[in-house]
Image (cartoon, rainbow, N blue to C red):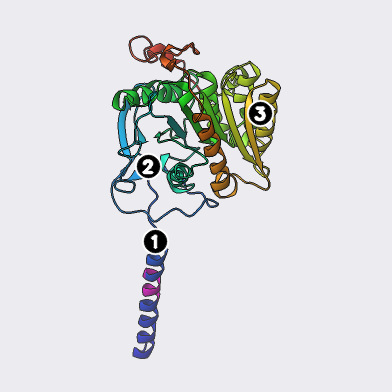
Amino acid sequence: MTQLKWNIFRAICLFSMAALVTWNCASAQVTQPTGTSVQPNAETPPALPSGKVICGLIQGEFPSAKRIELVSAAVGKDLCYIVFPPSEGSVKPATGYPLLVLLHGLMGGPGDWIRFPRILDRIKEAQQDQSISFPEIYLVLPLGKNGYWTNWNRSPQRWRDWVTHEVLKDLQIRFPDVSEWPEKRAIAGYSMGGFGALSIALEYPGLFQHAVGLSPTDMDLAIQKKNQQRVYKRVFGKELPQERIHRYNPFHQVKRGMGKEQHFFLAFGSNEAPKFSEGGRRLTKEFEQQGIEVTSIEVPGGTHSFKSTWGKPVMESWIRWLGAIWSTPTSTVPSSEMKRTPAKKLGKDDPLPNKSEKAENKN
């Protein structure tokens, strides 16, 4: 090879390497924290600072957030939940501060609620709007991974008990000024979390009087798609037993007479998959047929995302709805004294599955 050709060849190689390095640097992105999901149609979240990731939030990202880490006996894992307490200097109501629990969706995490729809901004706006009278509250966001907020079939993973028995109990101990009145408690969720929020409220009316379901999964319709059955088989069992699915599916809970004297809010998009859109329509109809109070919004052209369906307009609607409910006089009977659906206790009264029960888990 002549010297001229060699110089040309070396120049081409150096140029190619420089271009490759430049492309890699330009395409580098901030790593998404564990426990959060990227949603293409969601509102663009704010830039994330650097720092340690705790429970799906970066340390220092939201200074008012309290991150609580627990060893869950119900799930057998190290889990966590996030608490945003009332503003400093606020006056505690006689019945305690209202509680709002937010459940995330599949492949998501607590941070999704804060970044994409900016729930903290929406609540602050409602509190500043005198026509809404939205109170100072405790906002709680537990980590549920992909557990579907359900006690798994033949499995020690009890994601429902994690919320109802462990998070709420620990919260009451750490923050005793949280209201125990079910009228002052609400639970909300989107997608998987919408399913969980409605199902938990229906099963435990003595814990939550109000529930918001944003595109909640209708299990009857969800399991019809064979290519999507894997996650549901993990939760409900390999054979997808109808009896167990009906036990947890909000549609059948309402059909069995649950939900009396509770309040519900539904929202879903007309262009979502049938398990969300058609499921939302038939759940709304069942609520109405059972004479249960429900506010339902079908967003024209809405798809399965915060930007298209669950964003600011819908969020403002259900926050205003909840504020109106919480502004009404409350009962004088705390939830601990109300008649409720029997709840199993963890620990000595209700041990985790023994070896023989675990051995039966073939699903």
For the residue marked with disc 2, what is the amino acid? Gly
Please tell me whether mark 2 sits on a helix, a strand or a loop.
loop
3D distance between C-alphas at marks 3 and 1: 44 Å
Residue 19 shown in magenta: yes
Judge whether 165 appears above or below 46 on screen.
above
Which mark lies nearer to you, 2 or 1? 2
Q: Which residue is mark 2?
A: 56
Q: Earlier in the sequence, mark 2 or mark 1?
A: 1
Where is residue 334? Give x, y as percent: 42, 16
Please tell me whether mark 1 sits on a helix, a strand or a loop.
loop
Q: Which residue is mark 3?
A: 283
Where is residue 137? Give x, y as percent: 40, 34
Judge whether 71 appears above or below 65 on screen.
above
The residue lying toward the viewer, choosing from 322 and 51, is 322
Q: Which mark is residue 28?
A: 1
Q: Residue at x 47, y 40 (%)?
A: 107
For the residue marked with disc 1, what is the amino acid? Ala
Q: Earlier in the sequence, mark 3 or mark 2?
A: 2
Label 2 neighbourhood size at 10 Å, few (<14), some (14-19), many (20+)? many
Where is residue 68? Give x, y as percent: 31, 33
- The residue segment tinted magenta is 16-21
Does the image show residue 278? yes
